[in-house]
């Protein structure tokens, strides 16, 4: 009691924003990261540790990056060849960013989108990663208590990025597995109407294209419907396109920027894009986030706000050189796409061999795995029970669907691009063994139940089944298996 009282006294000395739980750190999504941090897998030092499959990180093409850096040492001011630029880069720079950096990022965004659209470098606003970009836009577009519509399932970090410090709410647009979680006008209208009935002011719609966690793309008709919807309601559209270059199969990625150029009736003041280099290039540590708005006022305001989360000029200088190398950029985009497709295909096909299906996808650094038939009960409590077994017994950090606000229990996000080939094979082997054993033991349980109902005297057979189910014959001794 004394420690609780002291804790409360300490919290009273701090702000409500600092001490509330708006960060979302108590989510199973982040709990999985903690489980990995406490017992990280290592092929030799800790081969029975937890494999991190909850981190959407692209590590498949670092050999290409390293090769470019070796061949272009002048790009870094920390090399002998580039040191002559050290002073110019190290001294104060304003919050507009280096002109060559903004030019290079705009050109890279065009290349990623197949050169079907153009981007104005003067509309490029920097931020500390996509996290900073989302919060900056939330501050620009909404007041505390206002809300953004967000189709489910959606990235858990949005709860932190858009809500924690801004006071903005996220209102779910419920999407379902019966149509592969597609965003429909009907679902948008229903969510908007519910918000109105609850006296919640909707200021915008946030979409993630390609989708995290689904790995799917919005087709042109859906994008057109979305733009028509936000125009009819006179609300903003924030398009998170940070996975634009991770598409590895048809259909191709269609940016909202293409809709802006095609739809004459579109109010461009309502359209804003969030981009970063964390996923497409695999540089989350560089904290390069971008806001690209078609609204002049938002560009000016967000540029002032960017003072709180600028990208270092050293990083800008290096990336400006790299992204201006069009031969390298084209090679990287093509090779990354091929490697992502190969890795995703190996994983999903391996799961399919043991009867585990995944949502059909063609983008992202993850896939959406369907484990509904492994739930003891079709509830979110049942989902979390299965997730704890996968974390604690199978030693894989996959993220449960409830942490993505999925409307149906039993779905899990699995990241596949943040590990080497051997770790991927070990992870696949673990989950295949788990599924196969669970299947076998479920069959045994069914046989026992059937025999009991028939009142058959087969106690010897039961003893043999129990022998088969003993720890000496079981590769895993999980709570799910025991139940």
Image (spheres, grey):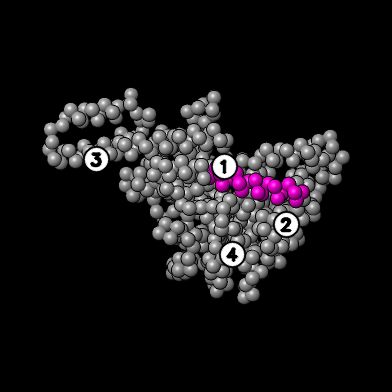
The structure residue drawn at horizontal position 64% and vertical position 70%, both measured from the top left corner, is: 262
Number of on-image labels:
4
Q: Position of residue 338 (x, y in %)?
A: 60, 46
Q: Is disc 3 surrounded by few (<14), some (14 to 19) or many (20+) residues within 10 Å?
A: few
The structure residue drawn at horizontal position 61% and vertical position 63%, both measured from the top left corner, is: 256
Look at the magenta stretch and give its main secondary structure. Answer: helix
Highlighted range, magenta: 325-344
- Quadrant for the C terminus, please: top left
Q: Position of residue 205 (x, y in %)?
A: 55, 63
Q: Earlier in the sequence, mark 3 or mark 1?
A: 1
Q: Is disc 1 surrounded by few (<14), some (14 to 19) or many (20+) residues within 10 Å?
A: many
Query: To which residue does mark 1 refer?
Result: 417
Q: Earlier in the sequence, mark 3 or mark 4?
A: 4
Q: Image quarter for residue 197?
A: bottom left
The structure residue drawn at horizontal position 72% and vertical position 57%, both measured from the top left corner, is: 106
Residue situated in front as seen by the camera: 241 or 131: 241
- Is 406 magenta? The answer is no
Residue 237 tag number = 4
Q: Image quarter for residue 67?
A: top right
- Quadrant for the N terminus, please: top left
- For residue 127, side relative to residue 359 (left or right): right
Q: Is disc 4 surrounded by few (<14), some (14 to 19) or many (20+) residues within 10 Å?
A: many
CA gap, disc 2 to disc 4? Answer: 20 Å
Q: Is disc 2 surrounded by few (<14), some (14 to 19) or many (20+) residues within 10 Å?
A: many
CA gap, disc 2 to disc 1? Answer: 26 Å
Please name which of the two marks, 3 or 2, marks the residue nearer to the observer. 3
């Amino acid at each position: 009691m004394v420690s609780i009282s002291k804790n409360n006294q300490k919290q009273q000395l701090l702000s409500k924003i600092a001490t509330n739980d708006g960060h979302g750190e108590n989510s199973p999504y982040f709990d999985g990261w903690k489980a990995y941090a406490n017992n990280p897998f290592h092929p030799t030092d800790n081969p029975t540790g937890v494999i991190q499959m909850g981190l959407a990180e692209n590590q498949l093409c670092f050999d290409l990056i390293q090769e470019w850096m070796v061949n272009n040492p002048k790009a870094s001011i920390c090399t002998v060849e580039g040191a002559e630029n050290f002073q110019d880069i190290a001294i104060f720079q304003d919050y507009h960013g280096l002109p060559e950096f903004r030019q290079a990022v705009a050109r890279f965004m065009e290349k990623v989108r197949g050169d079907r659209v153009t981007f104005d470098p003067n509309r490029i606003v920097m931020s500390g990663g996509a996290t900073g970009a989302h919060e900056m836009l939330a501050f620009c577009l909404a007041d505390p208590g206002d809300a953004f519509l967000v189709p489910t399932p959606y990235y858990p970090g949005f709860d932190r990025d858009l809500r924690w410090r801004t006071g903005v709410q996220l209102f779910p647009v419920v999407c379902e597995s019966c149509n592969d979680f597609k965003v429909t006008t009907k679902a948008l209208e229903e969510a908007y109407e519910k918000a109105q009935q609850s006296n919640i002011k909707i200021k915008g719609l946030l979409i993630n294209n390609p989708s995290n966690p689904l790995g799917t793309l919005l087709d042109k008709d859906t994008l057109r419907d979305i733009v028509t919807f936000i125009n009819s309601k006179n609300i903003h559209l924030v398009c998170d396109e940070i996975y634009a270059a991770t598409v590895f199969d048809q259909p191709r990625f269609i940016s909202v920027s293409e809709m802006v150029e095609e739809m004459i009736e579109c109010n461009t003041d309502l359209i804003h894009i969030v981009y970063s280099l964390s996923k497409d290039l695999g540089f989350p540590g560089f904290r390069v986030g971008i806001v690209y708005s078609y609204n002049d006022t938002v560009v000016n305001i967000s540029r002032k706000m960017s003072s709180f989360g600028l990208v270092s000029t050293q990083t800008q200088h290096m990336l400006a050189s790299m992204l201006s190398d069009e031969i390298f950029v084209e090679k990287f985009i093509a090779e990354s796409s091929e490697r992502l497709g190969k890795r995703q295909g190996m994983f999903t096909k391996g799961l399919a061999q043991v009867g585990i299906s995944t949502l059909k996808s063609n983008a992202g650094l993850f896939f959406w795995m369907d484990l509904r038939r492994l739930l003891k009960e079709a509830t979110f409590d049942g989902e979390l029970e299965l997730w704890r077994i996968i974390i604690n017994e199978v030693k894989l950090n996959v993220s449960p669907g409830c942490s993505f606000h999925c409307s149906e229990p039993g779905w899990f996000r699995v990241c596949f691009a943040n590990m080497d080939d051997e770790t991927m094979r070990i992870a696949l082997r673990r989950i295949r063994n788990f599924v196969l054993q669970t299947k076998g033991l479920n069959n045994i349980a069914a046989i026992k139940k059937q025999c009991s109902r028939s009142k058959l005297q087969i106690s010897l057979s039961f003893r043999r089944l129990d022998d088969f189910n003993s720890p000496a014959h079981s590769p895993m001794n999980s709570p799910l298996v025991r139940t």
